[in-house]
Amino acid sequence: QSALTQPASVSGSPGQSITISCTGTSSDVGSYNRVSWYQQHPGKAPKLMIYEVSDRPSGVSNRFSGSKSGNTASLTISGLQAEDEADYYCSSFTSSITWVFGGGTKVTVL
Amino acid sequence: QVQLQESGPGLVKPSETLSLICTVSGDSISNYFWTWIRQPAGKGLEWIGRIYTSGSTNYSPSLKSRVTMSVDTSQNQFSLKLTSVTAADTAVYYCARGPGGATREAFDVWGLGTMVTVSS
């Protein structure tokens, strides 16, 4: 199974919106709404931000939103804040009854 | 509030078996899936596999020949064994809850992670 494809880095100024893409195949992202997104600050464990494509766990800011079109899922962060600077990973269920992660995207707040 | 804690040796010799335990507190381990994920230094996350409290498992195809997961409901713990380790298995190992079962289709609770180094 191949990792999902994410851009290595995305940057934006405070207050702006940024979008991180996560591209898979018809065997994972394209066929299932089991896509989730995780935020990881340096030296910390990942934190669930979005599950099942677009749902937010309680306690996660509504500045974070998710969507999917075809084989590509996206995470949008609106009103970018300094605390959003972190690595972000997408994950998807696959037709092999396994899970696969993206390579990760480093978000920089300029 | 459910919490997960990984434990096990921080140093394993090449060709030996890596063994880790994840202890679940704050909730019963039953009726959930439980997952192991690892992350080499400076790299991305890798899904290792998951186990249901019935003992049913799914493993990553790339690690399947070397991985065994088990669950001990009496101790509220689940475990990972990875055989014939090499330096490429050096990573931070995380345990997590989910996906599926009685929770969301996502890894919704994570342990803090434990660093395992493979070296002689």
Image (cartoon, coloured by chain):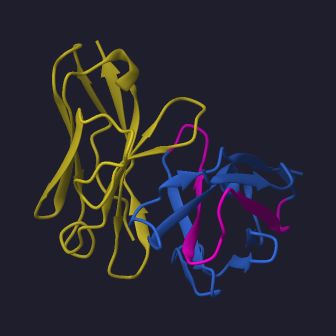
User: Residue at left 81%, top 71%?
Assistant: B75
Residue A55 place in picture, x, y as percent: 26, 53
Residue at 86% across, 53% down: B9
Query: For the point 63% across and 76% down, which residue is it?
Result: B30
Residue closer to the observer: A52 or A97 = A52
Residue A93, x across and y down, in percent: 35, 70
Work out whether residue B119 or residue B51 is closer to the camera in this orientation and state it: B51
Q: Is residue A110 depicted above or below A18 in this figure?
A: above
Residue A60 percent across, percent down from the top left: 36, 38
The image shows residue B46, relative to residue A94, as above or below, that is above
In the image, the chain rendered in blue is B
- Magenta segment includes B24: yes
Quadrant in the rendering for residue A29:
bottom left
Q: Which residues are magenta?
A: B14-43
> How many marks do you count on the picture?
0
Q: Is residue B31 above or below residue B76?
A: below
Q: Is residue B90 left or right of residue A19?
A: right
Answer whether residue B33 is magenta in the image.
Answer: yes
| Residue ID at (50%, 43%) | A46
Chain ID, yellow in image: A
